[in-house]
Image (tube, rainbow, N blue to C red):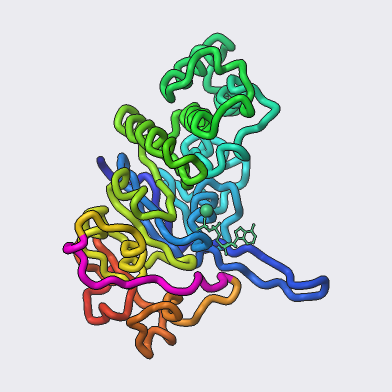
Amino acid sequence: MSGDILKIEDLKVYYPVRKGMMGKTQYVKAVDGVSLNVHKGEVLGIVGESGCGKSTLGKAVCKLIPVTDGNIVLNDMDIARMSENQLRPYRKQIQMIFQDPYASLNPRMSVHDIIAEPMEIHKMYSTKEEIDQKVTELLREVGLDDYHAQRYPHEFSGGQRQRIGIARALATEPDLIIADEPVSALDVSIQSQVLNLLSKLLKERNLTMIFIAHDLSVVEHISNRVVVMYLGNIVEEGTSQELYENPLHPYTKALLDAHPIPDPTKRKERVLLEGTIPSALNPPTGCKFHTRCKQCMEICKQKAPEKYSVNADHFVYCHLYDGMKSAE
Ligand SMILES: Nc1ncnc2c1ncn2[C@@H]1O[C@H](COP(=O)(O)OP(=O)(O)O)[C@@H](O)[C@H]1O
Ligand SMILES: [Mg+2]
């Protein structure tokens, strides 16, 4: 591992929505000032409840949706405001694996064409034979058979379709893969097979990956570091071990407590999460988590917390730690 492959700086992604015919435009602040770095060769987990902005963050980094503000620096180049033309060479470097393996594959294309398409778009090979060879190699790598190339997505199970999605993502030999809840749409019995495949590919190909999940238990094993998001912001960031052994933010604690703990003596205070995530259209003032936080103080309603540094790679955004060293 050396250096950062990706630096996200104060990224904002707002969706304009209009209430009624004459209503004025309001903004869903799906990602509302996120900064994070992804180190080369690591798996960075991003977790948080549904609606906290994980997919929006992933899609923005892949430049599939417009960025409202902030920077996305990929291999030292800011791609946040690049035109489609300028972007072309960079598109190859980031690929996304989508949550829904049913919706994300074109039903009218054969598996061969689905996997070949990104190689053709990026003019990676000069002959059809080379592309065919590469498709066969990729199919084998993800555990499918050569004859599957001529079949269509509807002929496959969910787990197999996700394997096709993974082969397509690998086709451009990307530097960074963003896997957006790649197993949450799959049967539980299939989930670990696909996770094992991803782990194998990570090792063999020395990939860098952002792994998005709403479930901390899914990212625990696959991630080196984990970022916890709440309503468009990061609330805590740390190595997987730090976050699981020493979670500091009340939201992280609540997320961890939502899952069975193998050794219940390890974590004594149980903080259960109540209520639902507030609307990103009209988020709470101050710390956005204050409306659900058991330890909410007066200042939490008024002021967004700073980023505090627990140690070199553990950060928390919470007023309970006011007085701790500010990060950056
Ligand atoms: N195209 C869209 N238009 C308007 N709002 C959207 C759109 N996509 C997502 N949102 C809203 O943005 C917020 C974040 O959504 P999303 O990024 O999908 O969260 P997650 O992946 O964490 O579930 C949610 O409030 C969601 O309703
Ligand atoms: Mg999502």
- Quadrant where the N terminus sits is top left
- Could you tell me which quadrant the C terminus lies in? bottom left
**Residue 279 counted in the magenta span:** yes
Residue 9 picture quarter: bottom left
Q: Is residue 10 left or right of residue 242?
A: right
Q: In this view, does 61 lie above or below 248?
A: above
The prevailing secondary structure element of the residues shown in magenta is loop
- The structure residue drawn at horizontal position 38% and vertical position 31%, both measured from the top left corner, is 197
| Residue 307 in sight | no
Tell me what residue is drawn at x 62 percent, y 43 percent: 84
Residue range of the region highlighted in magenta in the rendering: 264-280
Between 189 and 50, the one lying in front of the other is 189
Residue at 35% from the left image edge and 80% from the top image edge = 294
Q: Residue 167, how many percent across, how many down?
A: 49, 28
Q: In which quarter of the image is residue 19?
A: bottom right
Q: In which quarter of the image is residue 209?
A: top left
Is residue 130 in sight in this rendering? Answer: yes
108 versus 324 height, above or below: above
Q: Is residue 196 left or right of residue 33?
A: left
Residue that sits furthest to the bottom in the current view: 298
Of 137 and 294, nearer the camera is 294
Residue at 37 percent across and 57 percent down: it is 36
Image position, residue 158 (x, y; %): 53, 34
In-image side of 129 versus 239 (left or right): right
- For this orientation, the residue located farthest to the top is 129
Number of callouts? 0
Relative to 151, say whether 41 is above or below: below
Above or below, 143 relative to 297: above
Name, please, the residue furthest toward the left. 265
- Residue 23: in magenta span: no
Q: Choose between 219 and 298: the one closer to the eye.
A: 219
